[in-house]
Image (cartoon, rainbow, N blue to C red):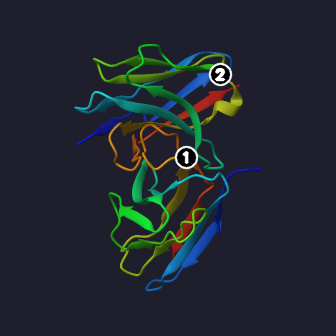
Amino acid sequence: DGGITQSPKYLFRKEGQNVTLSCEQNLNHDAMYWYRQDPGQGLRLIYYSQIVNDFQKGDIAEGYSVSREKKESFPLTVTSAQKNPTAFYLCASSIAPSGAGDTQYFGPGTRLTVL
Amino acid sequence: AQTVTQSQPEMSVQEAETVTLSCTYDTSENNYYLFWYKQPPSRQMILVIRQEAYKQQNATENRFSVNFQKAAKSFSLKISDSQLGDTAMYFCAFMTDYNQGGKLIFGQGTELSVKP
């Protein structure tokens, strides 16, 4: 079955630690995205990648980093510079890098809690 | 800046009834795309329906249909014959036509409860 997987489902982090959230897709999609969701709010774009070895900042990139070494993988690192990292993180992908109206398909998400 | 507004934080409907969720947006673009996503308690985001702004015809997907009013910048979602499984957060989202890497702008969501 094709789809998007995210791991882990729940993640706990101590203050000052970096953590990496995994996102893998087997849909053969070129474009991948990371969104953050806070309670009572919609999703906000952190980073996106339209093609391997290339990525751009979204609206709230500060304190986050990404890599795109393989087409199917787009890991997100939450660094200690992110002041309020507790949130629900969603990864998405779409078929083509143009972004012109392509539907984005989402993974099941990772809930990150800072202790 | 483009914005999406959902003015109804919560709504409820009786099973088998019809409900309409509101969404307005602000943009100066002429070509764009609009989406409704559903987020059930599992928190998985699921595409409900997609509308292309240059198409006059309103999109329909089984029990789900939209009322797209381009001049009014309104994009409401109608759910007919509501089912208990429709209970979820519903998000309206907007994407421009030019290359911003497929950036989706979301509204704050409407929490829909379907009551038996």
Residue B1 image position (x, y, % from top left): 23, 43
Q: Secondary structure at mark 2?
A: loop
Q: Is residue B7 visible?
A: no
For residue A92, above or below residue B39: below
Residue at point 60%, 72% (across, down): A11
Left or right? Give the position of B81 relative to A19. Answer: right
Protein chain holding label 2: B
Report the front residue among A97 and A40. A97
Amino acid bearing label 1: Ile
Provide residue A79's location: percent of width, then percent of height.
Answer: 43, 79
Residue at (41%, 14%) from the top-left corner? B56
Q: Nearer the viewer, residue B38 or A103?
A: A103
SS under mark 1: loop
Question: Percent x, y for residue A105?
Answer: 58, 46
3D distance between C-alphas at marks 1 and 2: 31 Å
Mark 2 burial class by Cα count in 10 Å: few <14, some 14-19, many 20+: many
Question: Residue at point 64% right, 19% down?
Answer: B63
- Which residue lies at the image location 34% right of the left edge and 62% below the top edge? A60
Parent chain of label 1: A
Q: Callout 1: few (<14), some (14-19), or many (20+) C-alpha neighbours within 10 Å?
A: some
Q: Amino acid at mark 2?
A: Ser
Identify the residue position indicated by label 1 in the image: A95
Q: From this viewpoint, which residue is outermost toward the bottom?
A: A16
Q: Nearer the viewer, residue B7 or A34?
A: A34
Location of residue B69 (image quadrant): top left
Asked if residue B85 lies left or right of residue B66, the reply is right
In this view, the mark in front (1 or 2)? 1
The residue singled out by tag 2 in the image is B82
The answer to whether dots 1 and 2 both sit on one chain is no
